């Protein structure tokens, strides 16, 4: 993993030796998960994840999993961020919409991919998160991310069209404003409940809920599926249905729990999707 010129500047400005080494190790972990795209890896590497966390959580900044902060707010896992960038086919100079800013990790990583000629527009309803995010962007001198205080479920009409849309929230049905905001060749990601026929064949869900109706009325978003929809006239047909999302366990190398996690969560990417190396 080599630094790009921008990466060197970021590291000198915001990474001490400890975090620099952790960021480098993280890219090696992502490579071990069959994620080799250099643009995506450099974007993950150059995003100062530790600056987005409270001080007591900074030591966990470069763990390859979701990092909870408060309530339902958390930093998206690096592996999911890299995976999303690849499945959305993000490229320099693209326009990307992120639904929900949170503490900004996925927005900043995407901004590193689309570069100065691209733009990441973020819709966030929490005014405090909007203000914190804007202050951070100013501090980091990031000019290709714009945070808008609005409802992600009812997008403003003046946002324009996007090459990719990524949600940080789950929805029971995909809002029409999301679909109408995708370019003709764009891709929309969405977290939605599993379909009733999928529920019927899912033993894990049957243990947690009596029936499909109870699943929809409870915390279904914990077992959401991730769909990617191309705007090519077939929006109703998902191109991909994801396995149950989960973090890698906090375990030492060689722990059997790690082997189980890799087998369960990565076989789809490496064998079914045949994720390209570059």
Image: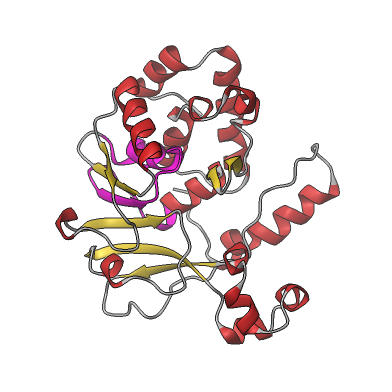
| Residue 245 or residue 46, whichever sits in front | 245
| Residue 201 or residue 274, whichever sits in front | 201
Q: Quadrant of residue 229?
A: bottom left
> Residue at left 48%, top 63%?
170
Question: Residue 132, how many percent across, how many down?
Answer: 38, 31
Q: Quadrant of residue 164?
A: bottom left
> Residue at left 62%, top 38%?
29
Where is 97 relative to 180, above or below? above
Describe residue 263's horizontal placement relative to residue 175 as left or right: right
Describe residue 215's horizontal placement relative to residue 116 as left or right: right
> Residue at left 74%, top 46%?
249
Describe residue 17's horizontal placement relative to residue 239 as left or right: right
Describe residue 81's horizontal placement relative to residue 174 as left or right: right
| Residue 118 or residue 154, whichever sits in front | 154
Q: Is residue 223 magenta?
A: no
Where is 35 relative to 10, above or below? below
Q: Is residue 88 magenta?
A: yes
> Residue at left 38%, top 25%?
4
Q: Quadrant of residue 46?
A: top left
Q: Which residues are magenta?
A: 86-115
Where is 171 relative to 213, above or below? above
Question: Residue 95, how many percent across, how many down?
Answer: 24, 49
């Amino acid at each position: 993993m080599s630094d790009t010129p921008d990466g060197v500047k970021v590291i000198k400005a915001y990474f001490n030796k400890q975090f620099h080494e952790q960021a480098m190790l993280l890219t090696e972990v992502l490579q071990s998960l069959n994620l080799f795209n250099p643009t995506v890896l450099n974007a993950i590497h150059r995003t100062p994840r530790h600056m987005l966390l409270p001080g007591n959580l900074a030591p966990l900044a470069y763990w390859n999993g979701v990092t909870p902060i408060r309530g339902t707010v958390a930093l998206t896992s690096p592996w999911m961020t890299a995976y999303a960038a690849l499945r959305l086919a993000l490229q320099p100079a693209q326009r990307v919409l992120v639904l929900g800013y949170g503490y900004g990790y996925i927005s900043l990583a995407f901004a590193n991919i689309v570069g100065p000629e691209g733009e990441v527009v973020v819709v966030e309803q929490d005014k405090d998160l909007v203000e914190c995010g804007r202050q951070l962007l100013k501090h980091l001198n990031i000019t290709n991310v714009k945070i808008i205080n609005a409802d992600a479920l009812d997008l403003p009409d003046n946002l324009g069209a996007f090459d990719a849309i990524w949600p940080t929230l789950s929805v029971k049905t995909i809002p029409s404003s999301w679909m109408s905001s995708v370019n003709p060749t764009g891709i929309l990601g969405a977290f939605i409940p599993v379909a009733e026929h999928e529920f019927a064949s899912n033993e894990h869900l049957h243990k947690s809920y009596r029936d499909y109706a109870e699943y929809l009325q409870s915390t279904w978003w914990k077992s959401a599926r991730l769909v990617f929809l191309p705007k090519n006239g077939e929006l109703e047909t998902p191109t991909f249905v994801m396995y149950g999302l989960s973090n890698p366990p906090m375990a030492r190398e060689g722990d059997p729990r790690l082997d189980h996690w890799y087998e369960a969560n990565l076989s789809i990417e490496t064998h079914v999707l045949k994720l390209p190396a570059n």
